[in-house]
Image (cartoon, helix red, strand yellow):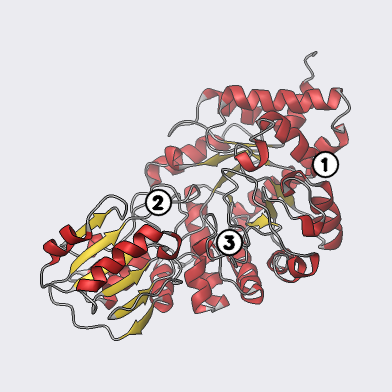
Amino acid sequence: MPHDPTLERLANATLLVPFESYRAPRWILDGLADGISGVCLFHNNLRSAEQVTALNASLREVTDLPPLISLDEEGGDVTRIGQAHGSDYPGNAALGAVDDPDLTRETFRALGLELADLGFNLDLAPSVDVNVADDNPVIGTRSFGSDAELVARHAAASVRGLQEAGVAACAKHFPGHGATSQDSHHTLPLVEADADLLRRRELAPFRAAVDAGVRSILTAHIELPGLGSQGPATLNHALLNELLRDEMGFTGVVVSDAMDMRGVSGHIGIPEASVLAVAAGCDLLCLGRFVYADQVAEVRAALVRAVHEGRLRGERLEEAAERNARLREWVGRSAVERAHDDASSAIGLTGARRAVRVDGELPPLADPFVVEVDAPPGMAVGDVPWGLGPWFRDTVRVSPDGDDPSAVLSAVGDRDLVVVVRDAHRYPSARAFVSGLLAAHPKAVVVEMGLPIWRPDCGAYVSTYGAAHVNGLSAAELLGAAGALEVTG
């Protein structure tokens, strides 16, 4: 295939790429200079605020039009900037539990201002999925709740908050990942609901986000036969055009979910899936976490080859490039116009405190023993600290599949017992382990840091609606942890 600089630059304009390190490698800087629209940063790119700020400044230096510098920063359980110790912002489930759209708007505005100060201009958030499947392995506390009208209220508020801070919001995962019991990182989930229900439930928050002026929307690698969708929504022309653009009136950038996820590329490979996604209507391809220089080149070559073969219209590439350029222009203007004010992450702790709920009567805890029952992190969450360990001296983390409750009970002795779980409803072994502890300590306090669906018979049940640092702190304050008030500063 002959070298085609014009098409290669247009193909580059559809790419949102990851890279390997704390400093931008040469292939990234050259790629941005040659038209790549932007980058997506992950944990392996983020070491400190100073390092991130310098990194993002170096990315801006190689282009006239600001590149899109993005990350998945939802607050709550899915955090990149809070990876070392947990997020300073409660996640969507906590904000939905409070149900104060003004709080949600201010929380996302504070988060957006922090991101902007670090040099980010596109946040792949908020998640506006309506979580109606209790066993959903990929959404859960990332959702504002199970009621479509509530989620829609907070979708609009979060979009406005982020964009008031000068950071483009990206409502996800269109048309809605909340009714799934499978994880699209690993397979292609099927949403079994008819068109009327999907329009009333799944689509309502996206309409609210569009009405709020959301600048981008991220697709889901899910199949929705009720909307006539065969295969992943990311690759479905009718969903992305007739539904999202023509019917719902969205004029911004359509971003694909990560193209390395098995739900979209597992059977056809990332380059071919990328061609199909652009042809279907995706403007910006989020390639994933580990798709580096050689694979990026393969995706670019596949897009160019598809145009030469007549499988992808050149006009579609031009359309995508134009939309992405408009978004880059918007973030450039917003960086200039953004007002520095007194917004603070302290709003995060305020929200977490308002979200926490107690069923039963909390006893006075004298020298409690805290047992954290481990749970595997989701693919989107990653390895982020959670629990009450920072605030309680005697805390142990146990594996419900490998540890013996009787050995833990021996360590507890006659002390007050606090048991911490995370989405216990999803893990039979965790429920069994906790039940074994409660048989010996029926007055124990159980703290649920996921969704409060399984509620055992215990002395008091505390729901935090998330496992962010501020969620843990809010629970520790309620339990009277020594030093918790000093930590709040």
What's the amino acid at mark 2? Answer: Pro
Q: Earlier in the sequence, mark 1 or mark 2?
A: 1
Residue beneath disc 2 = 376
Residue 366 in percent (x, y) is at 13, 77
Label of residue 319 in the image: 1
Q: Residues within 10 Å of mark 3 (few under 14, many from 20)?
A: many
Q: Residue at x 62, y 31 (%)?
A: 32
Q: Nearer the viewer, mark 1 or mark 2?
A: 2
* Residue occupied by mark 3: 162
Left or right of 405 in this view: 34 = right
Up-down: is 30 above or below 470? above
Dot 2 falls on a residue whose secondary structure is loop
Q: Please tell me which of labels 3 and 2 falls first in the chain.
A: 3
Give the spatial CA distance, label 1 vs label 2.
41 Å
Q: Earlier in the sequence, mark 3 or mark 1?
A: 3
Along the viewing direction, whichever of 91 and 350 lies nearer the viewer: 91
Residue 21's quadrant in the figure? top left
Bin the neighbour count of mark 1 within 10 Å (Cα to Cα): few under 14, some 14-19, many 20 and up.
some
Which mark's residue is nearer the viewer, 3 or 2?
2
Residue 422 location, x and y as percent? 38, 62
Q: CA distance from mark 3 to mark 2?
A: 30 Å
> Which quarter of the rendering shows the N terminus?
top right
Tell me if residue 220 comes above or below residue 89 in the rendering.
above
Front residue of 410 and 180: 410
Using the image as rendered, state which of residue 308 and residue 439 is in the foreground.
439
